[in-house]
Amino acid sequence: MIDVKLLQKNFDETATALMRKKVSSEIIAELKSANETLKTAKLAYETLQAKQNELSKLFGQYKKEGKSTDELKIEVDANKVTLGDLLDTQRSAEESLDAIIMRVPNIPDADVPDGADENDNIEIRKVLTPPTFTFTPKEHWELAEQNGWIDFERGVKLAKSRFSVVGGMGARLERALINFMLDFNRERGFEEFSVPMLVNRRALEGTGQLPKFEDDLFKVEEEELYLIPTAEVPLTNLYQDEILNGAELPIKMTGYTSCFRKEAGSGGRDVRGMIRQHQFHKVELVSITRADQSDAVFEEMVACASDLLSALGLPHRLVTLCTGDLGFGAARTVDLEVWLPGQNTYREISSVSNTRDFQARRAKIRYKEEGKNILAHTLNGSSLAVGRTMIAIMENFQQEDGSIIIPAVLQKYL
């Protein structure tokens, strides 16, 4: 959640920053109106409260001077009633502004490049050289069928489209990847957690999925529980409404979960294969830091995900997202895109974001330093999406006969 004080101190500058992230003029107008209503309500309450304080001081003076306090008491009592009404008005105005702010995305960092969409993202660098083939490389669904690793038809039979069944060596490879990723991250200082894959509404509000993205979540009927879209939600909210010791930060976490998304806004994209599924596995990185640590930890998380891909021998590139492609809660993001020979292009496999204090303000995650309670910074990133990593291995290490070489770092897990 953005800082209300920013709106109150400099609305125009804050609105300009939000418009860089494609916040509509209608939302900006709503914000401005709600902000002005709150300022007016606060001023009315504070003005009468100041007057009430002055009147209250007169009781002692009147008694010393022998004056009657009857009329004074009538005025003070009347003001008490009015103050109550004005306080209710102020609280209502605060709630209205908060309701709008909960739908407003984070402000992008000043040095994030401006842009409309993913076409305006900026490549940072490429890592490893894509393989060359003496044959036409196949896409992963062809290799999956040939090797019996992924069964898309039975996934539909068990659930519906965008579900799949992984079996045989594919299932073993999937499990090997999860273990390798967790071990790799743990060696980099990220403590491993196993967390619930169902969370309550408060947790999803804390990390910014609710209220804006409710249509993309799977909800349990007659329960305030949702299937998680990412392990970022439970890992970050482990410290919801807590005050941490600043000296013990950063807290660096990793965890494996299944993730569940309706993919409501995906349209007809990636309907074939495993690129975009309703259920998929992911190993996540989450960090909670002091404000002065978050940039360094961000670079550390990006390096961790990139080094993991390099250890697997997977060519990839790092891309800085422009303002128009930034996620709702992100102040800055670096995407890692893995090379897929079958598609002859790079595809996103990890997204590392610094949300600054945006999530911490919503989830009330603070740390104490020099006697003060300060909002923490929270960061998150995929490390990695397991299914997409398996796809990348299949396509990059395929042989002419359709067989697939397993990367050396995974062989001990198999």
Image (cartoon, helix red, strand yellow):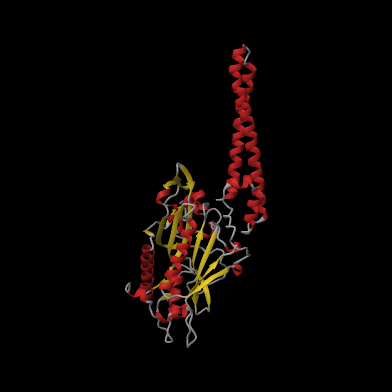
Q: Name the residue located 44 percent from the left edge and 57 percent from the top edge.
A: 287
Image quarter in which the C terminus is found: bottom left
Q: Residue furthest top?
A: 66
Q: Nearer the viewer, residue 119 or 148?
A: 119
Q: Residue 327's spot in the image, x, y percent?
A: 55, 60
Comparing 341 with 245, the one in front is 245
Provide residue 203's location: percent of width, then percent of height: 47, 52
- Residue 396: give x, y in percent of width and height: 45, 79
Identify the residue at image location x=63%, y=16%.
70
Residue shown at 57% from the left, 48% from the top? 3
Measured as percent of width and height from the top left, residue 137 is found at 48, 83
Residue 28 shows in this picture: yes
Is the residue 271 above or below the residue 218 in the image? below
The residue lying toward the viewer, choosing from 108 and 168, is 108
Residue 252 in the image: above or below residue 246: below
Which residue appears at 42% of the width and 84% of the height? 399
Locate residue 74: give its quadrant: top right
